[in-house]
Image (spheres, rainbow, N blue to C red):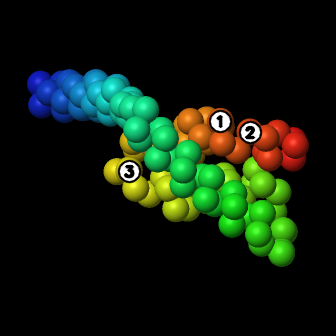
């Protein structure tokens, strides 16, 4: 083996170490984005959910349960009001539970 071969082996080992270090760095996640709820925003969300429940109750075709209907509405219509990564459907559901609890708990 020549000294050139040793250099190649060292370079390969260094490359492998650098790749594993960069893989570790890629796995570090940013802090979770937590939306600061205020009583006004929570009240507005509950108003919107209340209106949707009125719509659901007036609907003649009920292919979904109230729980499914609210979750789909929150996911498709309300969650999109926040930038990506800032809101989850389950948080919206939880924050509006005061309004829909009577109907959705009966579905479960």
Horizontal side of residue 22 vs 61, given as left or right: left
Picture coordinates of residue 78, whole percent (x, y): 50, 56
Label whose residue precedes the other's in the sequence (1 or 3): 3
The reply to whether dot 2 and dot 1 touch (C-beta < 8 Å) is yes
- Marker disc for residue 98: 1
- For the C terminus, which image quadrant? top right
Picture coordinates of residue 31, whole percent (x, y): 34, 26
Real-space Cα distance between discs 2 and 1?
6 Å
Real-space Cα distance between discs 1 and 3?
21 Å
Q: Is residue 52 above or below residue 99?
A: below
Crowding at mark 1 (Cα within 10 Å: few <14, some 14-19, many 20+): few
* Secondary structure under the numbered disc 1 in the rendered image: helix
Q: Which residue is mark 2?
A: 101
Residue drawn 52% across the image and 62% down it: 77
Crowding at mark 2 (Cα within 10 Å: few <14, some 14-19, many 20+): some
Residue drawn 79% across the image and 41% down it: 102
Real-space Cα distance between discs 2 and 3?
24 Å
Residue drawn 60% across the image and 52% down it: 49
Q: Which residue is mark 3?
A: 82
The reply to whether dot 1 and dot 3 touch (C-beta < 8 Å) is no
Crowding at mark 3 (Cα within 10 Å: few <14, some 14-19, many 20+): few
């Amino acid at each position: 083996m020549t000294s050139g071969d040793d250099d190649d082996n060292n370079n390969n080992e260094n490359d492998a170490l650098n790749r594993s270090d960069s893989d570790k760095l890629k796995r570090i996640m940013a802090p979770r984005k937590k939306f600061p709820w205020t009583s006004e925003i929570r009240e507005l969300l509950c108003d919107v959910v209340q209106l949707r429940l009125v719509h659901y109750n007036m609907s003649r075709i009920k292919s979904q349960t109230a729980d499914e209907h609210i979750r789909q509405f929150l996911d498709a219509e309300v969650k999109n009001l926040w930038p990506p990564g800032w809101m989850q459907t389950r948080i919206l559901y939880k924050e509006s539970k005061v309004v829909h609890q009577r109907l959705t708990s009966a579905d479960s």
